[in-house]
């Protein structure tokens, strides 16, 4: 069965520290990969996505993620976090099923950045 | 651009009562529609998805059901609520031919 695993549930960093959030998925077919972010009190919004091509994708606010097919991973990175990056981050996988896409989300990682 | 409406925004219901949460979309046709439940520390659990009118796929056995009576309407229901049904319910869509998921504002359900 399709699943998404996020390695850390809670991460606490100081401003300017580097960030890497792990994400692994299990699905043998073609997938689209996403990271979504939910800032306190706001809707989920797309941070970045991978469909094909260059496995290193860049998103908004200085975030990037690398798709490593052999490891079934799609880790999120940012070289220097800011207090405003405090949010919950969700990795998601779209798998094509008959008639449409089925999207599975990871459990989420809560990031708290200390000023 | 597409817009997702959900109502009510918040709901408090007693155990054993029925439930009906509505999701309607604008600005797109024939989208894939999704119901998720978001719980702290558990991420977004996919409950149902629909690729068209009357077509519902259920992801987990549970006390809930879904229906899609119109292209842009997706309803989440229950005949008798359980305490464990409390949570934050999100409706989402993927546009026809698209890949990115767009989310509605959600409904906070508390079962007492």
Image (cartoon, grey):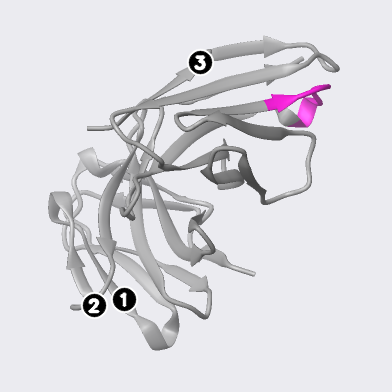
Please tell me which residue lies in front, B106 or B29.
B29
Please tell me which residue lies in front, B35 or A92.
B35
Q: Which residues make up the magenta segment? A: B77-84
Q: Residues within 10 Å of mark 1 (few under 14, many from 20)?
A: many
Q: Residues within 10 Å of mark 3 (few under 14, many from 20)?
A: some
Q: Chain of mark 1?
A: A
Residue at x 53% of width, y 75% of height: A27
Task: Report whether residue A62 is seen.
Answer: yes
Please tell me which residue lies in front, A54 or A81.
A54
Percent across and percent down for residue A17 are 22, 58
Is residue A100 found left or right of B49 in the rendered image? left
Q: Chain of mark 3?
A: B
What residue is shown with label 1?
A: A67
Q: Does label 1 lie on the same chain as label 3?
A: no
For label 2, the SS is: loop
What residue is shown with label 3?
A: B7
User: What's the CA distance linking mark 2 and mark 3?
Assistant: 39 Å
User: What's the CA distance linking mark 3 and mark 1?
Assistant: 37 Å
Task: Report whether residue A115 is seen.
Answer: no
Looking at the rendered image, the quarter that the C terminus of chain B falls into is top right
User: What's the CA distance linking mark 2 and mark 1?
Assistant: 5 Å
Residue at x 44% of width, y 38% of height: B92
Residue at x 54% of width, y 63% of height: A98
Is residue A18 depicted above or below A115 in this figure?
below
Percent across and percent down for residue B74 are 54, 30
Q: Chain of mark 2?
A: A
What residue is shown with label 2?
A: A55
Is residue A76 depicted above or below B103 in this figure?
below
């Amino acid at each position: 069965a399709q699943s998404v695993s996020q390695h850390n549930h809670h991460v606490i960093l100081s401003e300017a520290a580097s960030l890497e959030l792990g994400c692994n998925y299990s699905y043998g077919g073609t997938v689209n990969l996403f990271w979504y972010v939910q800032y306190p009190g706001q809707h989920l919004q797309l941070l970045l996505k991978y469909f094909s091509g260059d496995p290193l994708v860049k998103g908004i606010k200085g975030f990037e993620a690398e798709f490593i097919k052999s490891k079934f991973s799609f880790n999120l990175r940012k070289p220097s976090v800011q207090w405003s990056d405090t949010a919950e981050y969700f990795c998601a996988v779209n798998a094509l099923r008959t008639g449409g896409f089925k999207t599975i989300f990871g459990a989420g990682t809560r990031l708290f950045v200390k000023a | 651009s597409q817009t997702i409406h959900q109502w009510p925004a918040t709901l408090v219901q007693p155990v054993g009562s029925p439930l009906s949460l509505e999701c309607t979309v604008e600005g797109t046709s024939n989208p894939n529609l999704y119901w998720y439940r978001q719980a702290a520390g558990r991420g977004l659990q996919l409950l149902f998805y629909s690729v068209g009118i009357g077509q519902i796929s259920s992801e987990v056995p549970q006390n809930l059901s879904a229906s899609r009576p119109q292209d842009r309407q997706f309803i989440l229901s229950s005949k008798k609520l359980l305490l464990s049904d409390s949570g934050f319910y999100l409706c989402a869509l993927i546009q026809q031919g698209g890949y990115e998921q767009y989310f509605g504002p959600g409904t906070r359900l508390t079962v007492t």
